[in-house]
Amino acid sequence: MKLTNQKHLFSIPEEIIYLNIASQSPSFKAVEQAGIKGVLEKSHPYKIVGDSYFEPVKEVKKLFAKIIDVDDYNRIANIPSASYGLATAANNIILKKEDEILLVESQFPSNYYVWEKLANKFDAKLTIVSMPKSTENRGKNWNTAILNSISDKTKVVALGNIHWANGTLFDLKSIRKKATEHNSLLIIDGSQSIGALPFSVKEIQPDALICAGYKWLFGPYGCGYAYFGEYFDDGNPLEENWSNRLHSEKMVGLTEYQTDYKPLANRYSVGEHASFIHVKMQIEALKQILIWTPKAVQEYCEEITSEAVITLKNTGCFVEDENFRTHHLFGVELPKELDIQLLKSKLREANIFISFRGNYIRLSCHLYNTKEDFKKLTDCILACL
């Protein structure tokens, strides 16, 4: 399916060029309406019945399971943030002294601190694979360095499907293969890729996939998703939420305390994950992503960015080779002679919103963007050279 521009589904003003969904997604109109419906429902609590705590949650899990190619929705946990999901994974990993946890340079803080804490707890070692200094074949060489760093000492490999700041694409298939050879767990942060980049749990077989829900999945801030594989089937949750226990749907018998959890990843869902406002918004968002498909989103982003990337490269900017980056999110290293403050001023005048990372800019786009948006961006950059 070839997608066309979908800005009519959003409430973004016509004059605004938003190229920063990697920070926070805009809601589309159906998600807005679902949130309003949830707010109004709370005004009439006598309409909230037992099934309200369970059936919508099942629907959310089933929708997310389809997006990541999982057959059993019971392997999905509802989480409030990526850090909660990562902490849940770390809480169920036991290491020995001198074991290694493998990360890549400049991971998002939530995907660093949790592993630093785990390493300190067991007197284990954090191994950080640095981004190559040379821009020539950077993505390829970085992936090679990651593979070469996995050894018998490596017990956990934790990284994103892509790098959150520059969009470098990591070869998860090869990393999974090498990690399996050395009995290492693979924990993937999909916050900057799931929903906009095709991903299959069946193909990659991660031990856990953690994903914030307020970026490419268009959910409200404060929601997320986690897939947990077999390694975590009998683990310990961070909290003892009543609705995660077996037979919790039978609310008249809640004080007939249950020893057993619901099967698989259900034990890891956060308390109050049936949040009536959040869940309604999440359902509408995930339904729309399944209509669009991540593959078609990626293809659309490639189409609207390809000419701008050529222009940027011709002006002396560095953009990673397209075989080792994504099209929905990528970094642009600006020429050293470019005046960053002048560029920020011109972008403000043009109502263009992007992220700055030192001498890099991070561009992240979606179906509400156009080729013309990127032409206006490159015109601003050219005017500063």
Image (tube, rainbow, N blue to C red):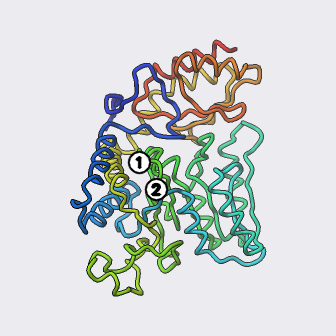
How many circles with numbers are drawn on the protein?
Answer: 2
Callout 2: few (<14), some (14-19), or many (20+) C-alpha neighbours within 10 Å?
many
Q: Quadrant of the C terminus?
A: top right
The location of residue 146, given as percent across then percent down, is: 69, 56
Give the residue type at disc 1.
Gly
The location of residue 299, given as percent across then percent down, is: 42, 36
The location of residue 288, given as percent across then percent down, is: 31, 44
Find the residue positioned furthest to the top.
383
The location of residue 203, given as percent across then percent down, is: 46, 60
* Residue at (32% x, 36% y) in the render: 29
Tell me the distance, in whole angstroms, between the alpha carbons under discs 2 and 1.
8 Å
Give the residue type at disc 2.
Gly
* Residue at (53% x, 47% y) in the render: 192
Q: Is residue 130 above or below residue 205?
A: above
Front-lying residue, 171 or 118: 118
Q: Is residue 172 left or right of residue 142?
A: left
**Residue ID for mark 1:** 219
